[in-house]
Image: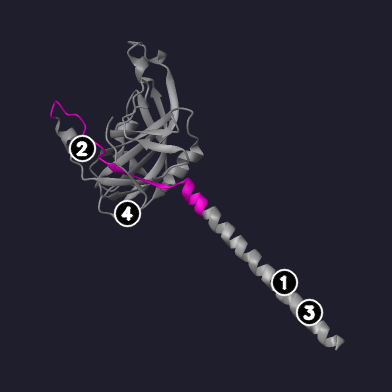
Amino acid sequence: MKQIKLIVLVFVLMVSLTGCNNEKAGNEKNGETSVNEASEEREPAEVITFPAYEEANPEKLPFIDKVNNTPAFHVKVNLPENWGVENRKPDVENLVPGDFYSMLSIYEKDTLIGYIGFNIFDPYEDPIPEEQYYQTVYPGLRLSSVFHWDPYEAVKTTDTAETGIADIWYLEPGEIDKHPGAMADVPQQETIGILSYDKELKVFIGMAFMPGTVSREQAEAVAQSISLSAETGTAADTGTKSTLHPA
């Protein structure tokens, strides 16, 4: 009889331990799911449509007409928490110079930290080392005497597209006219930006950040998440689409 009671006691103990382990495993799995869901909530996909608005063209310039008639495309990007793309042009005196149209403001809470815009290009057809191809896409950003987005480092490359980080140097635009004939006296600034092109879409986008607002690590994380697609492409079928117009 004592042996039977002992066997029953051991069996009950084993069942209890098994139940505890299963409950613990379930809690750990639920906890992992919650962490993943929270991570996704912190960095939701933003989908921005370009052209976001029509550029004024009172002089009827053919290139601006071509920009305004660019087939709609989407930029999908994961922005850090508290960042947002506002439906207005950036309006500050010493905005980071670039070569972009349909520009939109990027805010962190209530602080302007940069902008995003786009441009068009004709893909270079002659043979060229792939690591140098970006030079044919961004000549307007690399060869100016008052600013340049260079050096450049690719962070994500496909057969038809590439995204990279650019170090930006520039003379403060609002100060240039105050120093006629003395460019060396114009205050200089350095910051960081993101560039991304797509040969099939024949477009590129740029994100410039105001000096001291964004770390290189933050910029690289944003750059890794960027993808461009035509308006009917699958890459834009998820996320939060922004309806953006100039202020």
How crowded pointer 1 is (Cα within 10 Å; few <14, some 14-19, many 20+) is rated as few
Percent position of residue 34, x then y: 54, 55
- Residue span colored magenta: 37-60
Task: Looking at the image, tell me whether mark 2 or mark 3 is earlier in sequence order.
Answer: 3
Query: What residue is shown at x 49% (from left), y 37% (from top)?
Result: 216
Residue, disc 3: 10
Residue 163 has which mark?
A: none
Percent position of residue 214, x then y: 48, 34
170 to the left or right of 17? left
Between 11 and 52, the one nearer to me in the picture: 11
Percent position of residue 161, x then y: 33, 49
Report the amino acid beneath label 1: Leu
Report the amino acid beneath label 4: Asp
Task: Looking at the image, tell me whether mark 4 or mark 2 is earlier in sequence order.
Answer: 2
Mark 3 or 4, closer to the camera: 3
How crowded pointer 4 is (Cα within 10 Å; few <14, some 14-19, many 20+) is rated as few
Residue, disc 4: 237
Report helix, strand or loop for mark 1: helix
Q: CA distance from mark 4 to mark 1?
A: 47 Å
Residue, disc 2: 67
User: Answer yes or no: do the residues labelled 2 and 3 have beta carbons within 8 Å?
Assistant: no
Task: Looking at the image, tell me whether mark 4 or mark 1 is earlier in sequence order.
Answer: 1
Task: Looking at the image, tell me whether mark 1 or mark 3 is earlier in sequence order.
Answer: 3
